[in-house]
Structure formats: C-alpha cells, structure tokens
Amino acid sequence: MTRCGEAQTGRGEDERLKAKDRGNRPGRHRKEGKRIYVIFVYDVHVDRVARVLKTARRYLTWVQNSVLEGELTAAQFERLQDELKKIIDPEEDALLFYVLRSAGDVRRRKLGREKAETAFFL
C-alpha cells in the first residue's frame, strides 16, 4: 500500500524517516529549520539609514537607534545580509552582526527607557 503523494514523489517511508532523523522535514531546505538569535548594529551614512532600518525591520525587532535583534533561520539571515549589501557602501558604512545560538543565550540589562514597543496590538 502506498501513502498519498508517494507515487508522485517516489519517496518511500525509509527516506522520510532518514529526513526526520536528520532533523529535516521532507522537501524542506535544511537551512530553514534551525533558528539563531541575531543582534544587528549599524553605523551608515545618513543617506542610507532609513533604507537599512526599513530592510532590517522586515526581519528583526528595532530596539533602539541603530540596533535590532531577533530570531532568524540561517536562510533568513543570509537573505538579510544579501539585501543589506545592496544598500550599503562598504567604504563608508559598518554593519555588525552578533550571532548567538538562541534567545536563551542573551543576557540583557537595561538602563533607562525601552525604545521598542514590546506589546502587540491586533
């Protein structure tokens, strides 16, 4: 007996189990699964600040001027870097990425007010 979709893909139960054992979902790119925590800090020319911020906010949470953070997959992190490379001038601008294994690795101490809103409204 064949499972739904097995005849189309030719993928058997053994292959599904191997993919599951590797931590992958069948048909899913490997880089999409594991998440990392990224802190992004930038110092760019005033002409490019708005574009860098707008691009980075599609992936990360803005926490204060020139600083964003959040969880990304490796593929999202690569896309973010690729998009930012198209915006910046490497001779004038500086981008720093602090990459941690997970949000649990972050120890944050705050002095003063918080810039980013932590509440979400529907």
Image (spheres, rainbow, N blue to C red):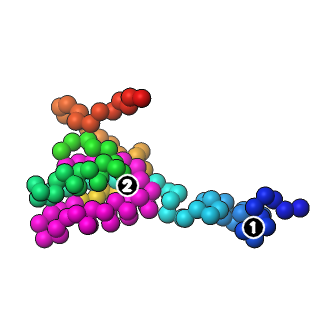
Tag 1: residue type? Gln
Tag 2: residue type? Leu
Q: Which residue is mark 1?
A: 8
Whether residue 60 is visible here, answered yes or no, is: yes
Residue 100: which numbered mark, if any?
Answer: 2
Q: Which residues are magenta?
A: 66-95
Q: Position of residue 18 (x, y in %)?
A: 69, 66
Query: Which residue does the image show at 45% across and 56% down from the upper left?
Result: 73
Q: Residue furthest right?
A: 1
**Residue 52 higher or lower than 120, as above or below:** below
Q: Nearer the viewer, mark 1 or mark 2?
A: 1
Name the image quarter holding residue 1: bottom right
- What is the secondary structure assignment of the residue under circle 1? helix
Quick one: label 1 or label 2, which is nearer the N terminus? 1
Q: Nearer the viewer, residue 38 or 87?
A: 87
Q: Position of residue 67 (x, y in %)?
A: 23, 48
Q: Position of residue 13 (x, y in %)?
A: 78, 64
Task: Describe residue 75's horizontal placement relative to residue 114 as left or right.
Answer: right
Q: Is residue 71 magenta?
A: yes
Name the image quarter holding the C terminus.
top left
Query: Which residue does the image show at 32% across and 66% down from the upper left?
Result: 82
Task: Describe residue 52's horizontal placement relative to residue 72 as left or right.
Answer: left
Q: Nearer the viewer, residue 108 or 8?
A: 8
Task: Describe residue 57's horizontal placement relative to residue 31 as left or right.
Answer: left
Q: Residues within 10 Å of mark 1 (few under 14, many from 20)?
A: few
